[in-house]
Amino acid sequence: MKNKETENKRLKNHPCFSVEAHKKYGRLHLPVAPVCNIQCNYCIRKFDCVNETRPGVTSKVLGPFESLERVRAIMERTSGISVIGIAGPGDPLANDATFDTLRLVHREFPEVILCISTNGLMLPDRLPDLLACGVESITVTINAVTSETAEKVYAHVLHGGKKLTGKAAARILMHNQWEGLSEALGAGLIVKVNTIYIPGINEAEVPRIASRAAALGAEIMNVMPLIPQAKFKDLARPSCGMLSKMRDVCRAHMPQMTHCTQCRADAFGLLGEDGDIEMELLHARIGEDYCENV
Ligand code: CLF
Ligand code: SF4
């Protein structure tokens, strides 16, 4: 059962869930999760997770204690960090360091909202651990509602000690994403859905993801434009106009995030006010046509 008062406070103070909060509060990412358990066709491992991070080269993977040191140092000299998140560079739930880090940080900074972003494969399994660590908000990246489309988006899924491909991979991934999302909402977490808008592959399913996520009670959706790379390097990146139109369609189902900066796994501070090096990496990688607030 959700505690409405706590939930509203979290939503109000979380820079990714609230457009107002992002002008006032920042997030601090801890890059402790290098391993991933799936292969998205738009991902190259040497870059940060493009589900949730800007595709700059990962500067450094930290361990749990190094992360705690980083939190201490940044909290001492930066005000307004309301959220500490783990968003890669791989999948947080595929890395035990995620849970060790969350526990350490929560013990010392219980007032900060803990957040993770995941592909959802291990969410039903690891939700109890996330709750025990004090996590209060999650993002699940869902790119398809049918296995035909999911098959095109994901090359493989590592599950139960096996490497699955095709429909078998698609089915287990989608089942766990929706199951995990639903259970997380039932457990009182605030939940955002990220969807990569991949022209020619999943545009017909993006609004269906919005509709289903809204029906389950997710708070907000973040439709992110494909960054063409890896197997999808020859696909077109959606224009600002296409993105805006897609968000309008999805808005009929649920609120849309329009202020995402596709930040790095090691970003910190207010959204959009990260260092110059990150901006250079972004522009070098995806060109100057990056559009925000559409
Ligand atoms: Fe980080 Fe993601 Fe939590 Fe935010 S980011 S784990 S929900 S605290 Fe935010 Fe960055 Fe966009 Fe993500 S701007 S990429 S939506
Ligand atoms: Fe890459 Fe993230 Fe997909 Fe894993 S979940 S393959 S790190 S984009």
Image (cartoon, grey):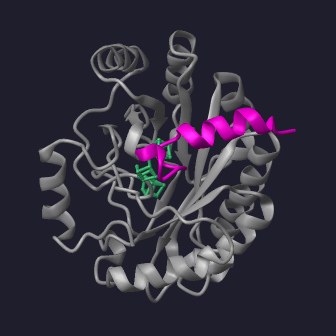
Q: In this view, does 186 lie to the left or right of 272?
A: right
The answer to which of 219 and 170 lies nearer the viewer is 219
Instruction: Give the image location of residue 58, x and y in percent.
Output: 26, 43
The answer to which of 291 and 89 lies nearer the viewer is 291
Judged from this view, the residue extending furthest toward the top is 108
Judge whether residue 89 can be spotted in this image: no
Question: Residue at coordinates 47% horizontally, 53% vertically from top-left?
Answer: 19
Query: Total marks drawn?
Result: 0
Where is 184 relative to 19, above or below?
Answer: above
- The span shown in magenta is 1-22
The answer to which of 225 and 161 lies nearer the viewer is 225
Q: In which quarter of the image is the N terminus?
A: top right
Instruction: Give the image location of residue 27, x and y in percent.
Output: 41, 36
Q: In this view, does 246 lie to the left or right of 171?
A: left
Q: In which quarter of the image is the C terminus?
A: bottom left
Judge whether residue 14 can be spotted in this image: yes
Q: Does the magenta stretch include residue 11?
A: yes
Instruction: Give the image location of residue 65, x and y in percent.
Output: 40, 14
Q: Is residue 210 left or right of residue 239?
A: right
Question: Residue at coordinates 33% horizontally, 40% vertically from top-left?
Answer: 270
Instruction: Give the image location of residue 262, x and y in percent.
Output: 36, 56
Q: Is residue 152 left or right of residue 60?
A: right
Where is 167 relative to 271, above or below?
Answer: below
In the rendered image, which quarter is residue 133 located in? top right
Question: Residue at coordinates 13% horizontally, 46% vertically from top-left?
Answer: 276
Question: Residue at coordinates 46% horizontally, 64% vertically from top-left?
Answer: 40
Q: Is residue 157 magenta?
A: no
